[in-house]
Amino acid sequence: MMKNNGFTLIEILVVFSFIGILTTLGVASYASYNGTQSVHSATNDVVTLLQSAKSRSISQVIPSSNSCVVNSLSGYEVDMTPGGQQYTLFAVCGGKMSISTAQLPYQVSFSASSTPTVFFNIADGTVTTPATIQVTGFGKIRTITVSQIGSMTVQ
C-alpha cells in the first residue's frame, strides 16, 4: 500500500478560490468604508468652519484689514460652490474679505441643491436665512442644517 503525502490539484484550487473570494470581499468592504469616512470627515470640516464663522460673529472678531477698519463689521459668511468642492470663510465689512478657503476631498462635493451662502450676523450669531447643505460622494449623502438661531445639525 502507498501512503499519500500531499494535496491534490483540486484541493489546492478550491483553497485558493476561497482565499481570492475573501480577499475581494475585504477590499470591497474597505473601499466602501473609506468612501463613507471621506464624506463624514468632509462634513465635519464644513461644520467646523461654520462654527468658526458663528463664533467669530458672536465674539465680534474684527479682522486686521483696511476695509474692516474703515467700514463696520456686519458679520461672517461661508460660501459654498453648489456642485463643486470649494468653500470659503469671509468677513463682511463693506465688502467681503476672504479669511480662509478649503476644498472637499477628491470625489466629494456639495450637492447642486445646497444653499450657497450662510451669513452669521454680528453679536448674536443668528443667520439671515436658514440653510441646508448637502455633502455627497461615494454614494453617500450627509446633510448639514443651519437653523435661524445658528445651531447646526448633521444627518
Image (cartoon, grey):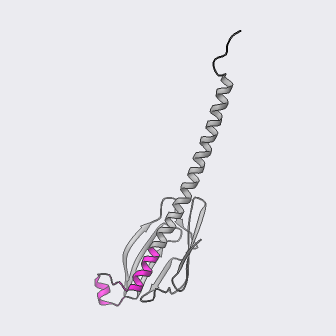
Residue sitting at x 57%, y 58% = 138
Looking at this view, name the residue that lies furthest to the right.
1
Q: Is residue 48 magenta?
A: no
Q: Position of residue 82 (x, y in %)?
A: 53, 71
Please state, as top left, top right, bottom left or bottom right, where the N terminus lies in the image: top right
Please state, as top left, top right, bottom left or bottom right, where the C terminus lies in the image: bottom right
Residue sitting at x 56%, y 51% = 31
Looking at this view, name the residue that lies furthest to the top.
1
* Above or below 53: residue 5: above
* Observer-nearest of 2 and 119: 2
Relative to 153, is 74 on the left or the right? left
Q: Position of residue 116 (x, y in %)?
A: 51, 76
Relative to 103, is 37 on the left or the right? right
Residue sitting at x 53%, y 63% = 39
* Above or below 79: residue 66: below
Q: How many tags in the picture? A: 0
Relative to 9, is 75 on the left or the right? left
Segment colored magenta: 49-73
Q: Position of residue 75 (x, y in %)?
A: 41, 86
